[in-house]
Amino acid sequence: MPAYVYDLNGLKQHAASISASMKGALGPELFYAAKANPDAAILRALDPHVDGFEVSSGGELTHVRETLPAARLAFGGPGKTDEELALALDLGVERIHVESPHELARLAEMGRRAAVLLRANLPIRTAGAALQMSGPFGMDEEALNACAHRIAHTPHLTLRGVHAHLASGLDAPAMLDLARHIIDWALPWLEAHGVERPELNLGGGMAVDYRSPESRFDWGAYAAGLPDCAARLRIEPGRALTAYHGWYVTDVLDVKTTHGETYVVLRGGTHHLRTPVTKGHDQPFTVLPRDGGGRTAPAPATLVGQLCTPKDVFARDVPVPSSLRPGDLIAFGMAGAYAWNISHHDFLMHPKPAFHYLS
Ligand SMILES: *Cc1c(COP(=O)(O)O)cnc(C)c1O
């Protein structure tokens, strides 16, 4: 205690059903964004059901390549170093998602063959909202034009298409709307730049609703709604693939009331499961009473960890059985993505959790 528990069988079924939805005549290729959870057992479980993996650092690249020597890889992310770009070419990365003209210039100067998607960050108007990935990601049209020009004059580089990861947390209709806007802009642009058999990577960001653990992104509607178009489409979700099949299980150390608020103090904390703090939600959970427990009326409590900071909160003012007591177990669900791997493990020097794989 505490432990992460991954349901690899459930994960395989989930990935297989998504992949089945994508398998229409020209359905999009499915890559997994490894940053959501790069656990080797998870990568291996996903491998038969995805077309490839998107990696965002030299570390991820090395790790995914070691874990899956034959996997198709795409390398994205801002701030790639020369060493990382060289490593990508050494390790046989299939597509490099170039983020800026300077990055492209450094890649060109290496004098090695590389196939490139240019990452676009265009303000796109969808149903009522203008979307644009905030932050240092991708390029506007002027920079994209400069890159296309540079590639056209660099024989060892090939422009294969456009990459656009513009939003996250969108449901299928909103994702489709965004996809149509990207396609409408990118196809003529790629044609104007003479790109044959163009590729369009539409990114990830498929919604995961932590308030509704049973709901799922509608992959069938998404795949069916994508327009038939002249480009090879590709998507690279992370969270919506792996979030549902991980649990963080721990036990109650103390139950106390201070200033009228009841706190349930759990072993471990957000240094193991940072997701609720990062996303600003209550992490969904199930109570497993030590003695099987009778049913008791629920009472509101705040579930916290062992860290000496008021931010160490898993769920605030949520109903728990009023009989909850030390030794009872709590299993936090939806802890399979952006969970252990985004947490600040060494803060306060508590022990690390165990990892269990159900298969
Ligand atoms: C993080 C990221 C993804 C995956 O996003 P999810 O919200 O986990 O689906 C895909 N592509 C890029 C470029 C990313 O940065």
Image: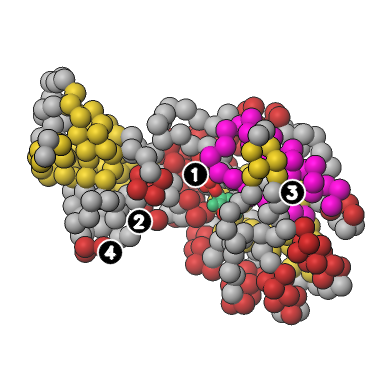
Residue 70 seen in render: no
Q: Earlier in the sequence, mark 4 or mark 1?
A: 1
Q: Which residue is mark 1?
A: 239
| Contact (Cβ within 8 Å) of mark 1 with mark 3 | no
Quick check: 161 above or below 157?
above
What residue is shown at x 45% (from left), y 51% (from top)?
37
Residues 33 and 105: in front is 105
Answer whether residue 60 is visible to the viewer in this image. Answer: yes
Q: Position of residue 334 (x, y in %)?
A: 39, 39
- The x, y position of residue 340, in whole percent, is 36, 53
Cα distance, mark 2 to mark 4?
A: 9 Å
Q: Quadrant of residue 127?
A: top right
Amino acid type, mark 4: Asp
Which residue bears the numbered disc 4? 346
- Going by the numbered disc 3, the residue's amino acid type is Leu
The circle on residue 200 is: 3
- Label 3, label 2: how far apart the Cα atoms are: 32 Å
Instruction: Provide the residue designation for mark 2.
Output: 343
Ligand 1 within 8 Å of disc 3? The answer is no
Prevalent SS, magenta region = helix
- Stretch of the chain drawn in magenta: 161-189
Identify which amino acid the numbered label 2 is placed on. Answer: Ser
For ligand 1, tell me if the residue under mark 2 lies within 8 Å.
Answer: no
Task: Please tell me whether residue 116 is drawn above or below residue 219 in the rendered image.
Answer: below
Are the residues at dot 2 and dot 4 in contact (C-beta closer than 8 Å)? no
Which is more N-terminal, label 3 or label 4?
A: 3
Residue 287 vs residue 147: left or right?
Answer: left
